[in-house]
Image (tube, grey):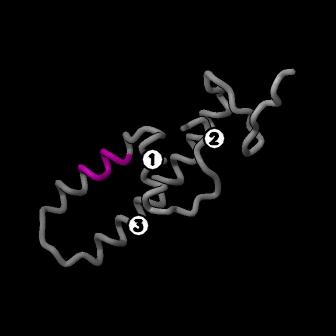
Amino acid sequence: MKKAPKVKYGIEIVKPWSKEMYNHNDKVADEVRDVVEKRWKDAYKTAEAEYDAENEDEDFHNELETAAYWRLNEIAEDLELELTCQFIGLK
């Protein structure tokens, strides 16, 4: 007897990933980036330490924009972000 397909957020979880899975994860990735960037900006504004903001800012944005799904998932979990939905297809 064939197992029922696993479905999350109305999307069937398959290997290799489907376009729907990639599209879903792209939306979640955008949300993680937006929430993390807002938190980072808020924290930065309240920081009192003096440092070269230009270099730190460029490093932060580059890492956030190029982060893979799995890394963004780790960041979201570490920061306990309350997202509208979660990444799918990751272990």
Q: Residue 25 at x, y = what percent?
A: 58, 40
Which residue is pictured at 82% across the width and 30% down the height?
4
Q: Identify which residue, 64 or 78, lies in the foreground.
A: 78
Residue drawn where x is 37% and y is 48% of the image: 64
Residue 49 figure quarter:
bottom left
Q: Which residue is mark 3?
A: 39
* In the rendered image, the vertical position of residue 47 relative to residue 57, given as above or below: below
**How many numbered marks have been drawn onto this rendered protein structure?**
3
Instruction: Check residue 62 for magenta coloring.
Output: yes
Amino acid carrying label 3: it is Arg
Q: Nearer the viewer, residue 70 or 52?
A: 70
Examine the image and state in which quarter residue 52 appears.
bottom left
**Badge 1 density bin: few <14, some 14–19, many ≥20, Cα 10 Å:** many
Check contact, mark 2 vs mark 3: CB within 8 A: no
Q: Tell me which amino acid carries mark 2.
A: His
Q: Secondary structure at mark 3?
A: helix
Secondary structure beneath disc 1?
A: helix
Residue linked to disc 1: 72
40 to the left or right of 89: left
- Location of residue 2 in the rendering, given as x and y in whole percent from the top left corner: 83, 22
Give percent across and percent down for residue 34.
47, 57
Boundaries of the magenta span: 59-64
Q: Which residue is mark 2?
A: 24
In the rendered structure, the answer to whether residue 86 lies left or right of residue 1 reads: left
Q: Which-is-in-front pick, marks 1 and 3?
A: 1
Q: Earlier in the sequence, mark 2 or mark 3?
A: 2
